[in-house]
Amino acid sequence: MEKVDRALSVWLLSVPSLLCLLSLLCCVPAGRPCLQCDRRVRLLHEDYLLAAASATIEDQIELKKILDYAYVTYTTTSNQYSGVIGPLTFEAIQILEKGRKILEKHLQTFVQKGLCPNKCGLLYQRVMNCLSCQYKLHTCPSTTQDCGEYPVEAAEGGQAVLDCFLPWHSLVVGRPDYHYTWAPGTQRTANLTEGDFRVLVVTEDSSVVLNQLHVDEEGMYRCLLTDGKGTVLSRTHFLLTVTPSPVPTPRSLLTLPSLPPSYDASPISHPPTDLLLVIIIMVTALSLTVSLALAIAFG
């Protein structure tokens, strides 16, 4: 009977204690990446044991086992996923077993989608190692660094916007740079070499704007995302096609009406030049003679 009473007292003590512990765990902000690494969780674990100092030694031992089990359960679940836990939500945790299942569900989703969201390129993401409670760089490789080739069309004299930003670029550690280069012509990526590309611009922005385009500016544009050490993290291509401006339509010439059939279109005959010269000389000589005669007649 004494053992039954002691077990009952331990159970009565442990149930409120466990509910209190869970309610305190639910108050932990979701921004902490590792539950067992949170300083407040460790202090709650230790302080609650000190608060039960008035109980008997045996009851304290049983209570410590229960609290340790709650702490170790989350640690074990964390370790099953390589010791890496991302942001979690604890609002739905009501009891320990249900909380463990919810935690495991969140971990599965995070590892599949949140831990390495890059479908292409190379990502070094800063995460917390829940085994050591220290931050580390987690490598997220992919099958290829090429993140696609996209066609871009623009009219001559217009503009084109090239943007190679991908959502996972915001997780890159440090201040990455975008290197834009250009290969004239309309060759495909497979036919181009590194020597075919010319440096266009290096910027912290993922997009560039090409203004006042000409036909000779079309070609293959490449965007390289690099980290502070110069490592290429992703590669994106844009095939730009510039449509020439339409040629202005020439004005039609006015057509004169046709002449009637009776009209003589033969050129007008003109006297020869020598004849005109003789006539001019004769008229001039005659004028001089008459003038001289009149002068003599009138004294």
Image (cartoon, helix red, strand yellow):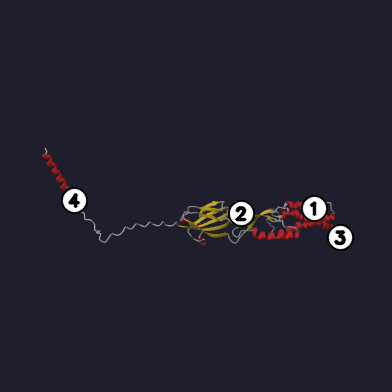
Q: Residue at x 14, y 46 (%)?
A: 286
Which of the two residues, 69 or 5, is positioned nearer the viewer here?
A: 5
Q: How crowded is mark 3: few (under 14 residues within 10 Å), some or many (20 or more)?
A: few
Q: Mark 3 or mark 1, which has the lower sequence index?
A: 3
Q: Which image quadrant is residue 257 in?
A: bottom left
Q: Residues within 10 Å of mark 4 (few under 14, many from 20)?
A: few
Q: Residues within 10 Å of mark 2 (few under 14, many from 20)?
A: few
Whether label 3 touches label 1, CB < 8 Å? no
* Residue underneath mark 3: 4
* Residue underneath mark 1: 49
Q: Which residue is drawn at 55% across and 58% down?
A: 236
| Local secondary structure at mark 3 | helix
Whether label 3 touches label 2, CB < 8 Å? no
Q: As shown in the figure, which amino acid type bears the numbered disc 1?
A: Leu
Image quadrant holding the C terminus, namely top left
Q: Mark 1 or mark 4, which has the lower sequence index?
A: 1
Q: Which residue is drawn at 79% across and 52% down?
A: 48
